[in-house]
Image (cartoon, coloured by chain):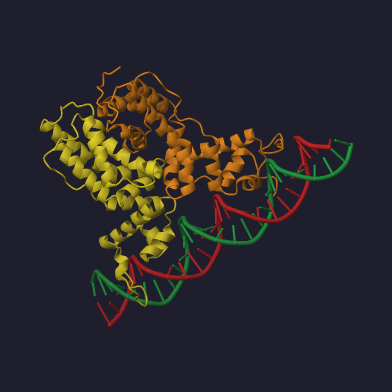
Chain colours: A yellow, B orange, C red, D green
DNA sequence: GCGTATCGGTACACTGGCGTATCGAAGGAC
DNA sequence: GTCCTTCGATACGCCAGTGTACCGATACGC
């Protein structure tokens, strides 16, 4: 993933011609990595410049300011938090979803943590965060629930249905405060088995 | 430089004698307020000094640094997020709890948001945050569940029991990202009715 | 090839917060 | 009433990050 390991030691950094889309992706990846590592406030333009081996002038020419760069990074790397999942049962879908989340918890969970407070104070940032990370995850989960209702696994008007995504995202966000570490697959799986599925009226032993 | 630029004090600020416990509470309250308003990173010693009308020297003499001041503020104002609640039924307790949380959501929810990311990078801060806010809330909720099991409302080994507090705290923390505003009483109540209680096997209509 | 636009890199002035030092003044002890 | 402590306030040096300006180098269009 990280392109920096293939740069052993050129005598001087090779000059670039223009900001190609591929090059922009490198910037975006660096920005998101730094956000995950240290948070929004600790992200600096100088840090981005030095990590990506570019001049600050390039950053300011292209994006203007740190908030704009972060928003662009979110929009520019809209990658699915959840892959497409369709196991045939709601319980299976949810189990697979938390497996995927736990597997990728080194990626999107820290990012949400890093941006959530900053986003509450910047409408643009909140909008970008929701579009890039939150709404896709919500949509994916709601789609699983919808299919489950369509198949008749749960009633179409199951009142717990609308809270499934909030439960999952919520527990992802609160676990670090309770346990000091991100929610892993094993915890999330137990949560789904023992809390989410029962709230929908599905027993823990449902296949 | 010249005394002409600011004349904010018609009356002279009354000198204080020493940092009495009451005075310390004023500092702590100011710190927590500023945390709620702007977050941990934006909190500055200079800001605290000017808001509390004290000299920076006083802050540094007394607390040494910003992290220590914040930790002291958390410890020094350990106020119950939840009042003591015992309505006689688990469902009643949980409904009352979310009512209290929703009512006080202008106080502790923003505080948790402000500190959660910083706490993940500072063990002392995480410890203080847990002791001051999180563990008391956890204990209160778990106590409700324990009493419910004792009364036979739910099985003693109900597997969903351990997730009740995580469900509640989690949804409190994720709501702003989904809806752009803190969880209010009405949302939390619907959540308890439609997700938490059903996950415990209690119907929504249980008194 | 050649010209030009853009790059990476650096220097600069500016800002804001940190932490220290110092000072006059007021409170409290006696 | 006097002395001594501690306060509030401010000035200072320091550092880090911002955003601009300028440079030589170089990839690309023609």
The residue shown at (67%, 40%) is: B7
Image quarter (top left, top right, bottom left or bottom right) of the N terminus of chain A: bottom left
Image quarter (top left, top right, bottom left or bottom right) of the C terminus of chain A: top left
Q: Nearer the viewer, residue B153 or B197?
A: B153
Q: Is residue A114 above or below residue A5?
A: above
Q: Is residue A76 above or below residue A143?
A: below
The residue shown at (32%, 53%) is: A73
Q: How many marks?
A: 0
From the viewer's perspective, tell me whether residue A105 is left or right of residue B61.
Answer: left
Q: Is residue B27 visible?
A: yes
Q: Position of residue A183 (x, y in %)?
A: 31, 45
Q: Position of residue A89 (x, y in %)?
A: 13, 38
Q: Nearer the viewer, residue A62 or A202?
A: A202
Q: Nearer the viewer, residue A10 or A199?
A: A199
From the viewer's perspective, tell me whether residue A99 is left or right of residue D26.
Answer: left
Quarter of the image holding residue A122? top left
Q: Position of residue A170 (x, y in %)?
A: 32, 38
Q: Residue furthest top?
A: B207
Q: Position of residue A70 (x, y in %)?
A: 36, 51
Q: Is residue A81 visible?
A: no
């Amino acid at each position: 993933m990280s392109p920096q390991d293939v740069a052993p030691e050129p005598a001087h950094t090779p000059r670039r011609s223009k900001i190609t889309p591929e090059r922009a992706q490198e910037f975006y990846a660096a920005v998101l990595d730094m956000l995950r590592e240290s948070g929004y406030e600790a992200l600096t333009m100088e840090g981005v410049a030095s990590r990506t081996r570019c001049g600050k002038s390039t950053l300011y020419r292209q994006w203007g300011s740190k908030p704009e760069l972060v928003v662009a990074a979110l929009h520019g790397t809209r990658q699915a938090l959840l892959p497409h999942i369709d196991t045939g049962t709601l319980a299976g879908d949810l189990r697979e979803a938390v497996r995927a989340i736990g597997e990728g918890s080194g990626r999107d969970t820290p990012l949400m943590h890093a941006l959530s407070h900053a986003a509450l104070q910047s409408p643009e940032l909140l909008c970008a965060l929701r579009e890039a990370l939150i709404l896709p995850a919500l949509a994916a989960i709601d789609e699983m629930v919808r299919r489950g209702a369509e198949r008749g696994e749960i009633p179409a008007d199951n009142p717990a249905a609308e809270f499934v995504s909030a439960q999952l995202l919520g527990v992802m966000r609160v676990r670090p405060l309770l346990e000091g570490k991100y929610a892993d697959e094993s915890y999330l799986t137990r949560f789904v088995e023992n809390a989410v599925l029962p709230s929908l009226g599905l027993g823990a032993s449902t296949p």
